[in-house]
Image (cartoon, rainbow, N blue to C red):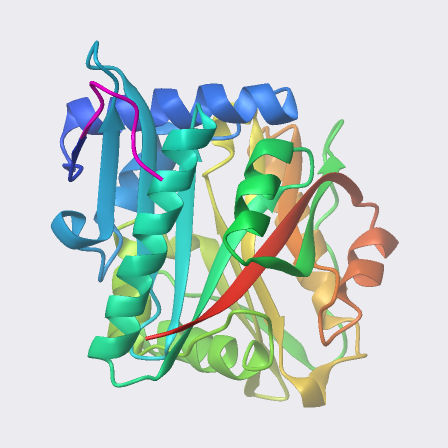
Amino acid sequence: MGLPAGHTVRAPRADDADVRALHELVRDYTFTVTGFGDYTADDARDELTEPGFDPDLDGRFVHDADGRLVGNGFVHRKGDSGMAGVDVVATSADVRGWLLGWALGRAEEIGRAAGHREVVVDHGCYRTDEPLRETLAEHGFRVATTFHRMRIDHTGPYAAPVPPDGVVLRVAGDDDAVRRAAHEVYTAAFADHFGFSPESYADWADRRERRPAFAWSQLWVAELDGRPVAMLECDDRFAEDGDGYIPELGVLAEARGRGIAKFLLRHAFATDAAAGRAGTVLHVDTDNVTPALGVYESVGMRAVLVIDAWRTVRTT
């Protein structure tokens, strides 16, 4: 599929002009399919500066004949795992189809360079985004799992929770030992989750330090009888909407069923409420290997948005 006459393609840049253009494109597009602008300037900057992302090779901007940005395509490799995430946003079917075809070709190159005969490619899609769903299906993608965005309202102070017996909560801050413990717990707790690819401590820490919305003071490790068994990570990516966000909450398999996850959730709620946040948000894979959805519902969270993860496997 070719691009319309007069359209041009180039690699994105991580400068203020391209960050602003990307933010406006994706914000306005998400408004059309969800009813609200689900993308911030920090999100745009994160995508363009993510560790391992080479804008010259892994990104494309499409401009129309008047110079307006009308589409973007990104490919985010997951180390040398043979997995890649692609993200395409476009205002028309022809631009969307061209960008997705380019992204799949780039994902195949990444898999081939890493020595894999196949590459697994994932793309997230709002359930309400019918145009993108059609384009993904046309390119061989199928729904692999579904994520729900969960939210709880904070209408006033939220009491700090009492930890379960034997549990001590430690904040990472400048403590390298706590940071490394969080990484170890994260790696073990999410090993069987959809789309997970392990990464070194250095890459994991670098990815967080590059995010404007993250601070090490928002990362905690729960110890059970002196052993790290759970981690909670929060950040400010939903601050523009007045909400706190939980990107990661993991509990080791042997420590589940002791109320530690609920304790960590309530700790996040209390922290967000004390900071004046209107609510707390997170995403959960409803085909999770753990009964996470039920845990979130049991502490008062409700589903507010559905996002499907589409997947295809390509020969390199």
- Residue 127 can be seen, yes or no: yes
Q: Range of the magenta residues?
A: 1-8
* Residue 17 in picture, x, y percent from top left: 17, 22
* Residue 148 in picture, x, y percent from top left: 71, 49
* Residue 11 in picture, x, y percent from top left: 15, 40
Task: Tell me if 271 is positioned left or right of 45 in this view.
Answer: right
Q: Where 116 sits versus 248, above or below?
A: below
Q: Quadrant of the N terminus?
A: top left
Residue found 30% across the figure and 23% down from its top: 4
Residue 210 belongs to magenta span = no
Q: Main secondary structure of the magenta part?
A: loop
* Residue 316 in picture, x, y percent from top left: 32, 75
Task: Tell me if 130 is positioned left or right of 40 in this view.
Answer: right
Which quadrant of the view contains residue 284?
A: bottom right
Residue 7 belongs to magenta span = yes
Which quadrant of the view contains residue 190?
A: bottom right
Residue found 63% across the figure and 83% down from its top: 252
Observer-nearest of 38 and 178? 38
- Residue 229 can be seen, yes or no: no
Q: Where 203 sits versus 188, above or below?
A: above
Residue found 33% across the figure and 52% down from its top: 103
Furthest residue in direction top, as rendered:
66
Residue found 73% across the figure and 32% down from its top: 154
